[in-house]
Image (cartoon, rainbow, N blue to C red):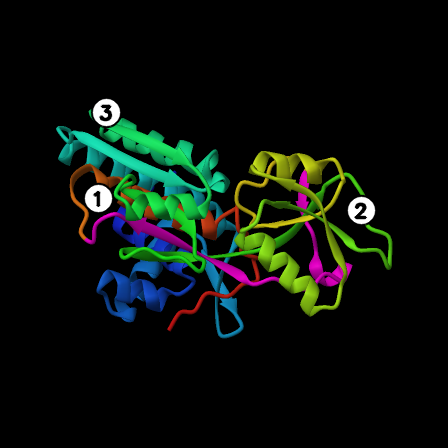
Amino acid sequence: MRRVTFDLDVLRTYVLGIELGSFARAADRLGRSTSAVSSQLKKLEDQAGTPLLHKAGRGLAMTEAGETLLGYARRMLELNDEAAAAIRGAELEGWVRLGLQEDFGEGLLQEVLGQFARAHPKVRVEVRIARNAELLERVTSGRLDLALAWAGNQDTPHAERLGEVPMRWIGAADRDIPFPTGEPWPLVALEAPCLLRTAATNALDSAGIPWRVAITSPSLAGIWAGVSAGLGVTVRTPIGLPPGLRLMNADELGMPPLPHLPLMLHRSDDVLAGATARLAEILRAEVMTLITADAVPRTKASPLAYS
């Protein structure tokens, strides 16, 4: 059996097309023509020896082999980019101050800081886990260099939109819906003001559904504990969902629909350099993976635009 050596440049096009939901947008991002991208995809399928994409309506969807390759491609590109960064920035030094929402404090933080520390061991990173208002205030006042936060009524001078994440109703995995018909829905929420709390109450009010706040918590850990105990439901995104909780099917349960929540990267300066620029680069890539992969699932039937 012949050995197959995948072309990393072709894999990068494949991954980018999947993440953007469009190979036409991937071509534009990479500065290539759509015909060039088409040739790359054909080359990749020749290397794989099996179809990776199939027609789905007016677009394309991944085959089972394509989904398998996507996971490996991401890992191969990550290692390649980490090696390149380590060589180029072996002497990178300094100090970076990063702020994150609690939702990202476990999985994303571990992955981002792990990559960064391996490539740039001489750079010190200081991390602040806080809510939106505090993160934005610290960026504006120069006490944070970067902050990953939900988009709301506040903003900073140098903000970059990274994507959108769906808000979802969340309940306990092993319990029935904790509210009898006709009684107010019990909500578990962070202390006000909170973007997701407001989204939940606005959705219920618009649907004419009575509600009450069963638990108010200053931290996300308290939210997860209350929902897991079956004391109410909450609204968060699929990111960072702990075991014992489930994303509820709003249509089947008569729950009102919820909007998507934009995710922003706030910077203390317009132009980043050195260690801060490198950390922002890693953060962007990991966020893109996070919001398009398992944390925010894309159904197999979801077509990818090709032209």
**Amino acid type indicated by mark 2:** Pro
Circle 1 Cα neighbour tier, 10 Å, few/some/many (<14 / 14–19 / ≥20): some
Total marks shown come to: 3
Image quadrant for the C terminus? bottom left
Name the residue that disc number 1 marks: 277
Image quadrant for the N terminus? top left
Q: Are marks 2 and 1 in contact (CB under 8 Å)?
A: no
- Quick one: 41 or 125, which is closer to the camera? 125
Residue 182 is drawn in which quadrant? Answer: bottom right
Cα separation between marks 2 and 1: 46 Å
Residue 145 is drawn in which quadrant? Answer: top left
Can I make out residue 285 in this image? no
Residue ID at (54%, 63%): 302
**Which residue of the protein is positioned furthest toward the right in this rendering?**
181
Q: Position of residue 45 (x, y in %)?
A: 38, 55
Name the residue that disc number 3 marks: 121
**Up/down of 223 relative to 49, above or below:** above
Residue ID at (28%, 45%): 141
